[in-house]
Amino acid sequence: MKKYGYVRVSTKEQNLDRQIAVMREEKVEEKNIYSEQISGKNFERPQYNKLIKKLKPGDLLIVKSIDRLGRNYNDILVQWQYITKEIKADILVLDMKLLDTRQKTGNLTGTLIADLVLQIFAYVAQTEREFIKQRQAEGIAAAKRNGKRFGRPEKKMPDQFKEICQRCKRGEVSTRQAADILKISHSTFYRRYRKEVEENVSNSRRFDTSE
């Protein structure tokens, strides 16, 4: 049985030394410690992939915390199942000793208990993410009802904007000519011009009492 350690940080500003020191305390040989700095946006993990190819049945993979295995709990569950069920290697998570798949005489800690604990963590994490999204959506909806705008404020149009829109609507100038006159991009003018037209149509319908 060989021991392997995997350490990872998300940014270059973070230091790998503390995690590496922990692996040494666990008697993992230097050549079996795989480390890398991987951001959340770019989650390609060449060192991790190299390590996984080295793992054999009965080997032990040690990580300091469970999030070293993936970006989210879906990723973590996939990796956990692959390592323990497909490769048939063991996993030890140092920050949570219940996540230890090694069979131990005299207690229940092992693959079964570790799997159950991980599933519970995954469920709780997923539920919490859904609650957070729900609260965010409710907060945004309430803010919109109170008139709050989100995103970047719209660019202020030149003083001639409405006048040029009317000329454009009458067919006196094209939308590209209008954009050139106002010295703004065609896409910006066209987007705001369409909005102006739609608002005018909406307002005219609102005040139409002929029906």
Image (spheres, helix red, strand yellow):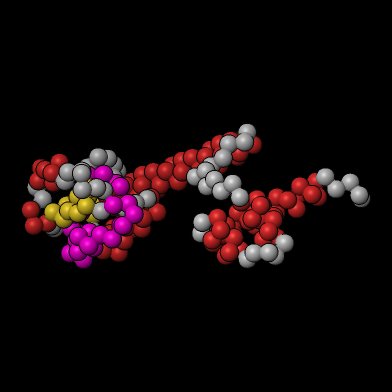
Residue drawn 39% across the image and 43% down it: 121
Near-viewer residue (114 or 82) = 82
Residue drawn 49% across the image and 40% down it: 132
Give the answer, above or below, for where 205 lies relative to 146.
Answer: below
Residue drawn 69% across the image and 56% down it: 166
User: Residue 192, percent across and down?
Assistant: 60, 54
Near-viewer residue (30 or 44) = 44
User: Residue 38, percent across and down?
Assistant: 25, 53
Magenta segment boundaries in residue numbering: 39-67
Residue 164 on the magenta span: no
**Residue extending furthest toward the right:** 211
Residue drawn 18% across the image and 58% down it: 59
Near-viewer residue (12 or 30) = 12
Residue 16 visible: yes
Residue 88 visible: no
User: Residue 134, percent across and down?
Assistant: 54, 41
Q: Which quadrant, please, contains the N terminus? A: bottom left
User: Residue 114, percent across and down?
Assistant: 32, 47
Residue 62 on the magenta span: yes
